[in-house]
């Protein structure tokens, strides 16, 4: 089990009802963690529409999670 | 210079940061909250940013523009928070010796900002409805099933 | 709105003429006197206009831009007289619902102004030399041996 | 012989030493009139680099001149 902190923005933040949480997970990658959280909280965005950042850097969905990582799930952007 | 700000953007002040008699051309882009989007009446708009990554990505975009175009200066700013109709959400300014580079770089910077900055937009409509505008602005959004684009 | 003016151009005032919450995008182009041109040090610059025809031609250019691009507003101004380094010589602003049209129209207007307005430029260099910059900015100049382009 | 007024700008104005003059000419077209004036005043611009306007409208080089016309010879422009 890894302990990581997860940050939510925009639609994910609203659907989760909070902007940040610390949790324990058996997921080994951002993709697996998102899928776990999506089922738990009913996120409407499918995983292929979400990118991930770890410790403020964009990462591959298959990157290995490590103890203490700060993970951000990034919905499609629509700036401007 | 690239910034994410929560206070109103003063384009004149940003313009000042670019003043340089060596350059002969300046192109600016301003984007503000407009009243209609795809047929719906917009009352106001909220921008939310993942600020640390947005600033890093913004600086990367400006560095790329400096590599690609013969420009003298580039400044860009994006605002966050709850904006009313007519308020500036984004401003880009580019100075160059020739207008080709100034037009090319300013277009590149705003396009990349809209596509790459982790900033989200929620529209508030008449009647109380709201919507997160969650569409990628160019092609497929690289998601968790794909390689990240940067 | 299109004007030829002999007083300094105030871009903020011109920008004001375009403010409209219906539009969501504004692109501006500013061109000013720069210190170097093709290797020579420029001290100042004089613009001379055949004003009646320049205004007629400028209005024609703006009308063409309105036909070609989905814009909300266009304003353009060219200054005449003796200008010092850093002074604005020309300013173009375009508002539109989408940035494609705003970029396209502003580029079209400044390109056509530079190619078609009967305005001439004399550069003053260090050492007292001067030169009328009499080169057509695109391709062959249609002279008395050719059909006029408009 | 036609009586017309001729206006000069930029390099033509400087080479002529004045901005406007009224003159009588046997030239029937702007092209012929420019050639006559070029030889007389030593204008350096060849006729193929000069356009003409009559009464504030661009015209063909072969347009017929008329009594009282206001003719402008337009050097290549270099605005901006």
Image (cartoon, coloured by chain):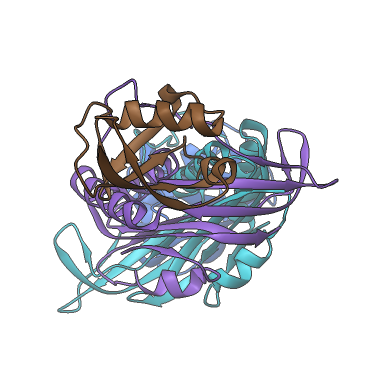
Chain colours: A brown, B purple, C cyan, D blue
The total number of labels drawn is 0
A44 relative to C19 in the view: left or right:
left
Give the vertical position of A27 relative to D24 (above or below): above
**Which residue is nearer to you in this view: B51 or A2?**
A2
| Image quarter (top left, top right, bottom left or bottom right) of the N terminus of chain B | bottom left
Name which residue lies at 47% across and 43% down.
Answer: C107
Question: Residue C118's x, y, as percent?
Answer: 50, 52
Spot occupied by residue A7 in the image (x, y as percentages of width and height)? 41, 48
Name the residue rendered at 32%, 62% in the picture: B24
- Counting from the top left corner in percent of width and height, residue A74 is at 41, 39
The residue under the point 27% across, 57% down is: B97
Between B93 and A76, the residue placed more toward the observer is A76
> Dividing the picture into quarters, in which one does residue B20 lie?
bottom left
Q: Is residue B114 visible?
A: yes
Q: Residue furthest right?
A: B127
User: Is residue D54 in view from this perspective?
Assistant: no
Q: Between A46 and B71, which is closer to the camera in this rendering?
A: A46
- Tell me which residue sits at (54%, 41%) in the image: C99
The quarter of the image holding the C terminus of chain B is top left
Give the percent coordinates (x, y) of residue D71. Answer: 58, 50
User: Is D44 on the left or on the right of C71, as rendered?
Assistant: left
């Amino acid at each position: 089990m890894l302990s990581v902190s997860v940050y939510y923005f925009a639609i994910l933040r609203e659907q989760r009802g909070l902007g940040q949480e610390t949790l324990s997970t058996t997921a080994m990658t951002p993709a697996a963690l998102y899928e776990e959280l999506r089922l738990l909280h009913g996120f409407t965005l499918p995983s292929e529409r979400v990118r991930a950042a770890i410790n403020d850097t964009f990462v591959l969905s298959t990157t290995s999670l490590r103890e203490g990582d700060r993970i951000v799930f990034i919905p499609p952007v629509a700036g401007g | 210079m690239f910034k994410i700000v929560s206070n109103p953007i003063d384009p004149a002040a940003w313009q000042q940061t670019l003043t340089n008699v060596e350059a002969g051309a300046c192109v600016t882009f301003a984007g503000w909250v407009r009243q209609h989007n795809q047929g719906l009446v917009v009352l106001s708009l909220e921008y939310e940013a993942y600020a640390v990554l947005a600033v890093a990505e913004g600086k990367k975009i400006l560095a790329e523009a400096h590599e690609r175009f013969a420009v003298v200066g580039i400044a860009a700013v994006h605002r966050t928070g709850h904006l009313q109709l007519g308020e500036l959400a984004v401003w880009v300014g580019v100075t160059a010796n020739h207008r080709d580079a100034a037009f090319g770089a300013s277009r590149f910077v705003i396009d990349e900002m809209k596509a790459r900055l982790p900033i989200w937009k929620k529209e508030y409509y008449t009647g109380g409805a709201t919507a997160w505008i969650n569409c990628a602005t160019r092609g497929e959004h690289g998601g968790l099933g794909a390689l990240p684009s940067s």
